[in-house]
Image: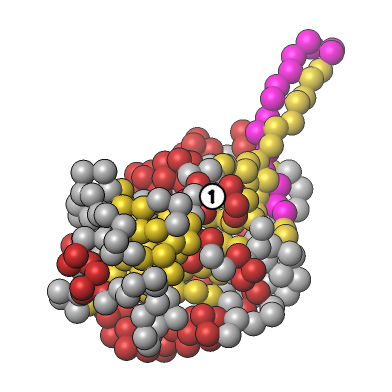
Amino acid sequence: MFIMRNVTQDDLQDLYELSGKVQFINLPHDKIIIQEKISKSLKSFISPNKDLSENYYIFVIEDLNARKVIGVSMIHAQHGTEFEPHFFLRVAHENKYSSTINTGFVHGTLKLGLDTNGPTEIGGLVLHPDYRGNTHKLGKQISFVRFLYMGFNQDRFKEIIHSELMPPLDQNGHSPLWEAIGRRFMNMEYNEADKLSRSNKEFIISLFPNDNIYMTLLPMEARNSIGKVGKETAPVKKMLESIGFQYINEVDPFDGGPHYRSKLNNIRPIKNKKSLKFSSDFPFDEATSQNFLVSIKKEGFQFYSIKTQASADDTHINFPKEVVDRLKINESDELEVIPF
């Protein structure tokens, strides 16, 4: 059985080992940084700061049989403030025409923008390589669990939910857009700039070009990467689009990865959320049951969830007996659910 829950101090070693199997800025291979992230997440779950930008929520998925955390996902309650703006490149077009030679062109343009009152951002999705492609759809579980939590804690988040997707990289793992623009103006490696931007964004304002950047002046490889996603990210893009997210004609200023957004209440799983009471008298019928993510109160955790089959109507829900017994669900327990 796999369960999802808030991160705890006991997860440090598992997360550290997981960070060594992936190269991901939100989960660096550094025990001290991971420890700081865990502490900040625990504070957010227990007593969130009134300043939403200080609140980070980390969810983990655990293989109960192996007693090991095998995946993680995150929410930043507000990405973009006066002190740490959210930067983006606006993707637009500009028409040019000369009556003298009766010739016109439509140029794609990029222009740096910033937001000092930013949206809630979902990100930090990592699944252990050995568990990818699992029939239980573990990647989807650890992704959707954020919508379960946000749906029933809407006062902790902004009205707009934001997601940044990874673009295609070249054969050496480099970003074509960074090589075409970022390196020329900032004189540093992409990973170095991305890491620095997490704590200090002054260099972006000071060094990045402020005027329109014409895409026709960029190498073809860079142009073709703008607003596109890499092969491994394509399923994430498809999933986001299927539940209500849309591309907003903005991309990451460093790598050109697309930005997707949706209003919180327009996200399909959140629109279909329910609060139901468990009842053993309500019949469980495997033939007509559906899959749900279910939030259950569990002693010692601020948040605890599973994916399971269930039979439900507008007020009651029931599960297979082994689920009820293992999770010790009690009669009339109120459960929060979203369809999966």
| Residue furthest to the right | 100
**Is residue 253 in sight in this rendering?**
no
User: At 70% across and 22% down in the image, what residue appears?
Assistant: 105
For this rendering, which residue is in front, 226 or 78? 78
Give the side of residue 9 with respect to residue 325, left or right: right
196 is higher (above) or lower (below) than 145:
below
| Residue furthest to the left | 65
User: Residue 60: x and y, percent?
Assistant: 35, 72
* Disc 1: CA contacts within 10 A as few (<14), some (14-19) or many (>=20): some
Give the side of residue 116 with respect to residue 270, left or right: right
40 is higher (above) or lower (below) than 57:
below
Q: Find out whether residue 110 is within the magenta segment.
A: yes
Q: Which residues are magenta?
A: 99-113
Q: Find out whether residue 147 is within the magenta segment.
A: no
Q: Main secondary structure of the magenta part?
A: strand
User: At 25% across and 54% down in the image, what residue appears?
Assistant: 284
Mark 1 lies on a secondary structure that is helix
Write down the residue under mark 1. Answer: 271
